C-alpha cells in the first residue's frame, strides 16, 4: 500500500483542437483521490504532438520535479497521452522516472510501469499500437490535404475577418461578406493615406463594425488585416510573416475562385506605407533605455534569478513555473552601489552602448 501523503503530478495532453482534456481530468483526479495522492503538479499540454516529440519539455520538467522531490508519482490517463514515438521512447521515459526515484501509473493501464513480464509486454504492445495509430492518422491527414490541394480548395486554418466558408469538406471556398467588401478597401486606403493601426481601429469602432473576436478593435487586429494577402485573392501559409511585415515569396499560394476585395497593388502600397512609418519606443532618435548592470543577480532569500521589472530588480523564481518569492530591490540604487563597488576594485574601462543609424538589408535578404 502506498502512503496517503504522496505528492503526485497529473499528466493531461490533447493533440488537436477537437479534443478536450476535460474528458481525461475526471478519471485522473478520481484515481488520485481513491489512492490518497495529493495533486502537487499539473502537466497540461494542448496541441502538442506526442508522435513528434513536442511533449519533451514537459517530460523533462517531470523528471526535474521527481529529482527535487516535488512529486513522487506521475499519473496519466493512458500511455499514449505521454508518448507515441514507439516502445523505445516510452520505456526510456519510464526508466528516467525510476532513476529519478519515482514511478508512473495510468488510470486505463494498471500494468503500466510494472517490471514483471506481463507488465512490460502490455506496455510494449500499447506503445506499438499508439505509434502505428499516429502513423496511420498522419497518412490519412496527408491524403486529405492532397485532395484539397488538387481541388484548389481551402486548407485548414484560420478564416480572416469578413469571410465565410461554403462548399463540402474537400472543396471549400472563402466568400467575402458585404461588410468586408465595403470596409476592407477603406481600411487599406486609410493606411496608405497615413492612418495608424490604432486610428483605424478607433474609426472601425465608431462605424459600429464588429471584430472577429471581442467587442472592440485593437491595433493587432488591424495590423493582421493589412498584412493578410487573402483580401487580395491570395493566401500565405500559416505562421510565416516576417518581422519586416511581408510574407516570403515561397509562402504565397494563389487560391482559385476567391473573390478579392482589393487589388494586389493596393495591398503592396498599404504594406509599404506601414513598413516606412517612423519607429517608436526605446532606441529611437538615439535614446536607449539603460540596461541592467547585473545580468546574473541572485535573490538573497531563495537564490532564484532576479531580472529588471520597470524600476526594480524582481525575483522571478526557478524552473519553468517562474514563481518568485516576491523579493524586489530598487533598480537605480542597486546599480549605483554596484557601480561604486566596481570603481573601487577595478581599473577596467566602463563601456556604454549608443544607437547608430545604419542600412537595413531585411528586404534584400528576404528576396534572396
Image (spheres, rainbow, N blue to C red):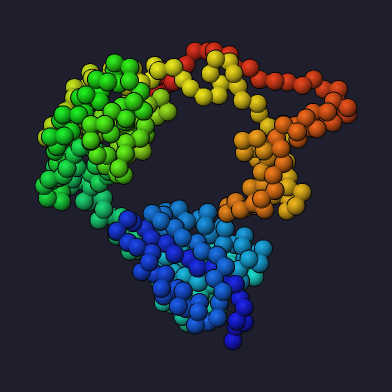
Where is residue 190 shown, x and y percent of the image? 27, 20
Give above or below for 197 relative to 172.
above
Q: Is residue 2 left or right of residue 180?
A: right
In this orientation, which residue lies closer to the viewer: 352 or 146?
Answer: 352
Image quadrant in which the N terminus is located: bottom right
- Write the residue at 18% across / 22% down: 263
Q: How many marks?
A: 0
Q: Is residue 83 left or right of residue 233?
A: right
Q: Is residue 335 left or right of residue 194?
A: right
Where is residue 113 shown, x and y percent of the image? 52, 75
Q: Is residue 34 left or right of residue 289?
A: left
Q: In the current view of this chain or complex, which residue is farthest to the front? A: 206
Give above or below for 331 relative to 3.
above
Give above or below for 320 relative to 220.
below
- Write the residue at 30% across / 42% down: 215
Image quadrant in which the C terminus is located: top left
- Write the residue at 36% across / 38% down: 239
* Residue 177 figure quarter: top left
Where is residue 200 shown, x and y percent of the image? 31, 27
Give above or below for 226 relative to 5.
above
Is residue 150 visible to the viewer in this orientation of the structure? no
Is residue 309 visible to the viewer in this orientation of the structure? yes
- Write the residue at 53% across / 54% down: 57
Where is residue 141 shown, x and y percent of the image? 26, 53
Q: In the current view of this chain or complex, which residue is farthest to the right? A: 344
* Residue 254 figure quarter: top left
Amino acid at each position: 500500500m502506498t502512503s496517503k501523503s504522496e505528492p503526485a503530478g497529473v499528466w493531461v495532453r490533447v493533440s488537436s483542437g477537437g479534443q478536450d482534456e476535460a474528458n481525461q481530468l475526471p478519471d485522473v483526479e478520481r484515481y488520485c483521490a481513491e489512492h490518497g495522492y495529493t495533486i502537487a503538479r499539473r502537466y497540461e499540454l494542448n496541441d502538442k504532438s506526442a508522435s513528434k516529440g513536442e511533449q519533451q519539455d514537459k517530460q523533462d520538467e517531470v523528471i526535474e520535479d521527481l529529482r527535487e522531490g516535488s512529486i513522487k508519482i506521475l499519473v496519466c490517463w493512458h500511455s499514449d497521452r505521454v508518448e507515441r514515438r514507439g516502445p523505445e521512447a516510452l520505456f526510456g521515459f519510464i526508466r528516467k522516472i525510476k532513476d529519478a526515484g519515482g514511478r508512473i501509473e495510468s488510470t486505463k493501464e494498471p500494468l503500466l510501469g510494472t517490471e514483471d513480464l506481463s507488465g512490460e509486454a502490455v506496455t510494449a504492445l500499447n506503445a506499438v499500437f499508439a505509434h502505428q495509430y499516429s502513423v496511420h492518422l498522419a497518412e490519412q491527414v496527408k491524403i486529405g490535404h492532397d485532395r484539397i490541394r488538387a481541388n484548389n480548395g481551402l486548407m485548414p486554418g484560420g478564416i480572416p475577418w469578413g469571410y465565410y466558408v461554403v462548399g463540402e469538406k474537400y472543396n471549400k471556398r472563402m466568400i467575402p461578406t458585404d461588410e468586408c467588401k465595403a470596409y476592407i478597401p477603406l481600411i487599406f486606403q486609410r493606411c496608405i493615406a497615413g492612418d495608424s493601426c490604432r486610428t483605424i481601429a478607433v474609426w472601425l469602432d465608431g462605424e459600429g463594425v464588429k471584430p472577429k473576436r471581442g467587442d472592440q478593435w485593437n491595433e493587432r487586429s488591424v495590423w493582421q488585416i493589412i498584412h493578410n494577402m487573402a483580401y487580395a485573392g491570395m493566401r500565405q501559409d500559416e505562421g510565416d510573416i516576417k518581422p519586416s511585415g511581408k510574407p516570403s515569396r515561397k509562402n504565397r499560394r494563389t487560391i482559385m475562385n476567391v473573390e478579392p476585395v482589393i487589388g494586389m497593388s493596393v495591398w503592396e502600397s498599404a504594406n509599404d506605407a506601414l513598413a516606412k512609418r517612423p519607429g517608436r519606443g526605446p532606441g529611437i532618435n538615439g535614446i536607449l533605455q539603460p540596461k541592467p548592470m547585473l545580468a546574473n543577480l541572485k535573490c538573497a532569500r531563495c537564490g532564484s534569478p532576479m531580472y529588471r521589472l520597470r524600476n526594480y530588480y524582481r525575483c522571478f523564481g526557478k524552473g519553468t513555473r517562474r514563481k518568485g518569492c516576491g523579493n524586489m530591490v530598487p533598480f537605480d540604487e542597486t546599480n549605483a552601489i554596484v557601480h561604486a563597488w566596481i570603481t573601487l576594485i577595478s581599473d577596467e574601462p566602463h563601456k556604454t552602448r549608443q544607437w547608430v543609424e545604419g542600412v537595413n538589408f531585411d528586404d534584400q535578404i528576404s528576396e534572396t
